[in-house]
């Protein structure tokens, strides 16, 4: 498989020692960090933690560099990127910032992660928007038609995953964003399951807001993420929180005087307005290292490898008696996430047995009641063979 994608699979796997112990098929939940990235990460932590304020300037340079590297990766300007802790943060910030009334509709899908559902459920409880739904089909054209039928005159925002965490289905985000743009409806795309698997260009996608993280497909540090706010949409959001670093001019006691509320300060004119206070600057140095490490294999090779592996997984799984595949077959409509069920097994018990009895790390999904595996840049054919052998043994048991 390494030959067909051009990715140096042996080198990729050598840098991931956990692969000697387990079959790791769960990058869609959390990635595993390659040793060179981990070395950069530990060095950045040591530098900032040991040096404190002495190390502040270089730590901040690393932080800003990460913003620039990430922005380049996702087709954005650095000023359009707020660095967050995770993908959920991005959704929660938009949900808390967008001035919506109780009758304004927020249209989303039936396959969203709690990262999308809870922030909007809370906003709704507080009288800011009301959730409405359309269902994702395996066929993107059918998904698009269902979406169009679900749009209502009161729809103000559409919130969709780029890739469904349930079935790995890739949604027709470009078509949906362009439909919305023509009608003045805002769009927020959850890229938690897309950035790092295949190339994502937010500018081309045409969304207004997007969110993602560094700890899944980028295999970067846990607790890193981003919120993208298209430059001309910054004014639409009213940040719910503020602190030092998020304002212009910067903090000045004389300026604030005795009436901070009335003083002439505003939010900084970039997505940095969502960042304030002391931050985990060192983690972001390692996020650049993670992105550059994958770049070293070549993004095209990474994507081809994920496409080839997941394609083989799907073909082999579909040929197994009693196995039902829930992910679309064509790469352009799917992703490295492959969801399947086995007759007679609930997702939870199948997932538990694969983990405990066979050392195959994957995840259960709820709808459908099934198991999801993630094919990442380091996934090998042997991983597939082990999974198939385990499924056959479970069927016999
Ligand atoms: C589609 C999707 N969105 C959001 C999240 C949450 O990501 P985070 O943990 O970075 O907030 C996940 C995590 O599995 C996901 O699959």
Image (cartoon, helix red, strand yellow):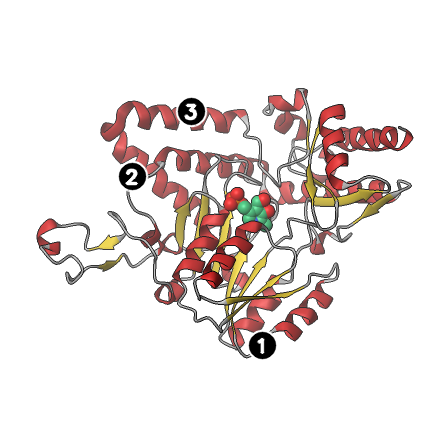
Residue 376 pos. (x, y %): 65, 38
Q: Residues within 10 Å of mark 2 (few under 14, many from 20)?
A: few
State the separation of the CA atoms marked 2 and 1: 42 Å
204 horizontally vs 52: left or right: right
Q: Quadrant of the N terminus?
A: top right
Q: Residue at x 61, y 68 (%)?
A: 175
61 horizontally vs 34: left or right: left
- Please tell me whether residue 173 is drawn above or below residue 299 in the rendered image: below
Q: Residue at x 69, y 65 (%)?
A: 143
Q: Residue at x 55, y 28 (%)?
A: 34
- Mark 2 — residue? 278
Disc 3 on helix, strand or loop? Answer: helix
Q: Earlier in the sequence, mark 2 or mark 1?
A: 1
21 horizontally vs 128: left or right: right
- Mark 3 — residue? 42
Mark 2, mark 1: which one is toward the viewer? 1
Mark 1, mark 3: which one is toward the viewer? 1
Q: Which circle marks residue 160 in the picture?
A: none
Q: Which circle marks residue 152 in the picture?
A: 1
Q: Is 237 in front, or is 285?
A: 237
């Amino acid at each position: 498989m390494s030959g067909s994608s051009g990715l140096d699979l042996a080198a990729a796997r050598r840098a991931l020692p956990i692969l000697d112990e387990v079959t790791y098929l769960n990058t869609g939940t959390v990635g595993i960090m390659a040793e060179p990235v981990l070395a950069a990460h530990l060095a950045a932590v040591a530098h900032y933690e040991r040096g404190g304020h002495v190390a502040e300037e270089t730590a901040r340079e690393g932080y800003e560099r990460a913003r620039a590297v990430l922005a380049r990766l996702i087709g954005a300007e650095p000023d359009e990127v707020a660095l967050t802790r995770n993908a959920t943060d991005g959704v929660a910030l938009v949900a808390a910032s967008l001035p919506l009334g109780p009758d304004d509709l927020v249209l989303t899908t039936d396959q969203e992660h709690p990262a999308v559902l809870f922030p909007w459920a809370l906003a709704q409880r507080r009288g800011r928007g009301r959730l409405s739904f359309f269902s994702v089909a395996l066929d993107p054209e059918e998904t698009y038609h269902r979406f169009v039928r679900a749009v209502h005159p009161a729809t103000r925002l559409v919130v969709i995953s780029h890739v469904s965490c349930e079935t790995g289905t890739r949604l027709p985000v470009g078509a949906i964003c362009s439909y919305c743009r023509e009608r003045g409806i805002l769009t927020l795309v959850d890229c938690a399951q897309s950035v790092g698997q295949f190339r994502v260009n937010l500018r081309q996608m045409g969304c207004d807001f997007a969110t993602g993280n560094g700890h899944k497909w980028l295999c970067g540090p846990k607790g890193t993420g981003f919120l993208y706010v298209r430059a001309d949409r910054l004014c639409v959001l009213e940040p719910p929180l503020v602190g030092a670093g998020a304002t212009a001019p910067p903090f000045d006691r004389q300026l604030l005087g005795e009436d901070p509320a009335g003083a002439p300060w505003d939010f900084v004119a970039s997505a940095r307005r969502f960042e304030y206070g002391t931050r985990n600057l060192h983690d972001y140095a390692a996020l650049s290292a993670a992105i550059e490490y994958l770049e070293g294999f070549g993004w095209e090779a990474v994507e081809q490898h994920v496409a080839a592996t997941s394609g083989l997984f799907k073909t082999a799984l579909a040929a197994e008696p009693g196995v039902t595949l829930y992910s679309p077959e064509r790469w352009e409509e799917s992703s490295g996430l492959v969801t399947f069920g086995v007759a007679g097994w609930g997702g939870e018990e199948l997932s538990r047995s694969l983990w405990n009895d066979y050392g195959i790390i994957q995840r259960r999904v709820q709808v459908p009641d099934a198991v999801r595996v993630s094919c990442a840049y380091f996934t090998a054919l042997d991983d597939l063979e082990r999974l198939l052998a385990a499924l056959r043994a479970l069927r016999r048991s």
